[in-house]
Amino acid sequence: MSSMNLYVGNLSFNTSENGLKDLFGAYGQVESAKIITDRYSGQSRGFGFVEMSNRSEGEQAIAALNGKDFDGRQLKVNEAKPRTNDNRRGGGGGGGGGGGGGWR
């Protein structure tokens, strides 16, 4: 049995990690709940992640909670995509030799 990491979006700024844990706990064992905050202000950024102890519980939580009203906001819940280490460089290819600055 593998755990499942869920993305939870459109959170109210009043939602706490404990509130998130309680909400998802109705669908199975919650390994962790983390609300992402701004590193400077400490203010919630309106989304977080919940790790459920197994995939079937995670899928039940998605089915039950995606679109549900919680703390006055309509939640967006889906499976979190693993972070990729793409370094944001992409293929792109060189920028065509730039015509050397010429003398006048």
Image (cartoon, rainbow, N blue to C red):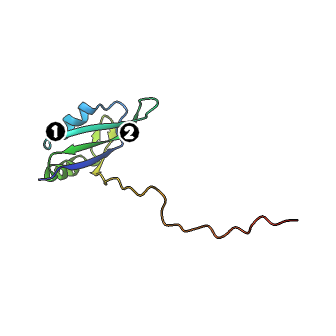
Nearer-N-terminus badge (2/1): 1
**Relative to 52, is 67 on the left or the right?**
right
Residue 7 spot, x, y in % from top left:
30, 47
Residue 91 spot, x, y in % from top left:
49, 66
The answer to whether the residue labelled 2 contacts the one labelled 1, judged by CB atoms less than 8 Å apart, is no
- The amino acid at mark 1 is Gly
Residue nearest the observer in this picture, 64 or 37: 37
Q: Quadrant of residue 38?
A: top left
**Relative to 22, is 80 on the left or the right?**
right
In the displayed orientation, state which residue is furthest to the front.
103
Circle 1 residues within 10 Å: few <14, some 14–19, many ≥20:
some
Which mark is on residue 25? 1
Residue 25 spot, x, y in % from top left:
16, 39
Residue nearest the observer in this picture, 93 or 10: 93
- The amino acid at mark 2 is Gly
Which mark is on residue 46? 2
**SS type, badge 1:** helix
- The structure residue drawn at horizontal position 70% and vertical position 67%, both measured from the top left corner, is 98
Q: Is residue 77 above or below residue 37?
A: below
- The structure residue drawn at horizontal position 14% and vertical position 44%, both measured from the top left corner, is 27
Q: Is residue 56 above or below residue 74?
A: below
